[in-house]
Amino acid sequence: MTLYLKNTRYIDAETLKVSSTHIAVEEGARGGISLIDSIPAADARSEDDQVIDCKGRFVTRSFGCGHHHIYSALCRGMPAPPKIPTNFPEVLEYVWWRVDKRLDKDMIEASALAAGLQMARRGVTFCIDHHASPFAVEGSLETVAQAFERTGIGHLLCHESSNRDGDEIAEKSLAEHENYLASGRPGLVGMHASITVNDDLLERSVALARKFDTGVHIHVAEDVADEIHCEKTYGKRVAQRLQDFGALESPKTILGHCVHFTDEERRIVSRSPAWVVSNVESNQNNNVGLTGYDWVDNIMLGTDGMHNDMIRSAKAHHLVCTATEGIGYDEVYRRFRNVHKYLAQFDGVGDNENNLVVLDYDSPTEITDDNFLGHFIFGLESAHVNTVIAQGRVIMADRKSTLVDEEEVFTYAREQGVRLWKKLTEG
């Protein structure tokens, strides 16, 4: 099947060149696109082919999230914690670890469906997720994967291995990674952070990643407490500890945050092939600090579970890093698009050029080859997303899902949210 986009103004995601053209979109995880002068006549097309008249709307490559926690989808409006946190370790203890301990399969599924639908609405067609459900580990990654696929979202998943809930749960998390990756699913080996991962779990997680030719996905120096604990317990900083265990050797490894690095830690990571993910809104929300990222080339953007809107993340990154490093529009956009460069290492995961957004962007000023970045930073919003194409098929048309009943998804999510909130109030 070929999808034809008629009457578009196509913005090349790499060159930013704007072309008035028609587009032929191939279906499939490895599909591409072709800019064409005319749409083939009806008798020259397959009966399965589809034509969409974009009516002069802008079309460009869709978006990807470099670090998410989709299990937070049910947390909007949840009850207050039993104690108001005064620092980041208490935020984890009294908020997020209370949530993840209470998740079950239905809540996980509802979270993934709701987050997937919300990402699709915002033009995000690929999600690198860091999942945590210590008391519902078995099968959790496949549950998330299937829910994402129902909403049209590509994925690279892992489970958050940690020693914080005991050795038995750490073993279950390692087994979940092993089973998921052995099934042929693409993924990473997840860990929470140095502060809750002992040497044995770190060593075995890195070995598992090597076994499946993938990387680890871990929070790193998000808060200064991570560094303090590492120095006190292991006599070294977090980046050095990860390097010593081989966690930085893979170009598929993802390090979330990296806020509290010393210059030496920055040198260690920048000289490695590992990737860093910036989540500035989460850092501000948790009051852990802000930093610049001009020291690393392999950097992409995430949401850290705050929301599902990558355009919003890019704008926040611009505002923060204007202050911390004097970032330019071009570098914001490069970091925003770097997720595609990272994902290109995983063959057939479905993040090719046939993932597109049709933008109903009614700007009062012209978009040209030279000024798109100004529109991207100051004009474009996720509300302008009209139609979304993932792996060559339409998953959102005129702002409505073509794959799932939206009301059914959100009704299910609300039901599971109530169940979660009840568990949170029970102790």
Image (tube, grey):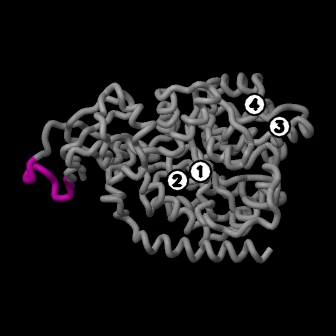
Location of residue 141 in the rendering, given as x and y in whole percent from the top left corner: 60, 59
Q: Which residue is mark 4?
A: 261
| Side of 405 relative to 334 (left or right) | left
**Element marked by disc 1:** strand
The residue where tag 3 is placed is 227
Q: Secondary structure at mark 4?
A: loop
Question: What's the mark number on residue 18?
Answer: none
From the viewer's perspective, is 288 left or right of 118?
right
Label 1 with label 3: CB-CB less than 8 Å: no
Q: Earlier in the sequence, mark 4 or mark 1?
A: 1
> Which residue is the site of mark 1?
68
Q: How far across and down, in percent of the image, does residue 254 sit? A: 63, 39
Label placed on residue 308: 2
Q: Residue at x 82, y 45 (%)?
A: 195
* Relative depth, front residue between 323 and 48: 323
Residue contact between numbered discs 1 and 2, judged by CB atoms under 8 Å: yes
The foreground one among 157 and 400 is: 400
Residues rendered magenta in the picture: 41-51
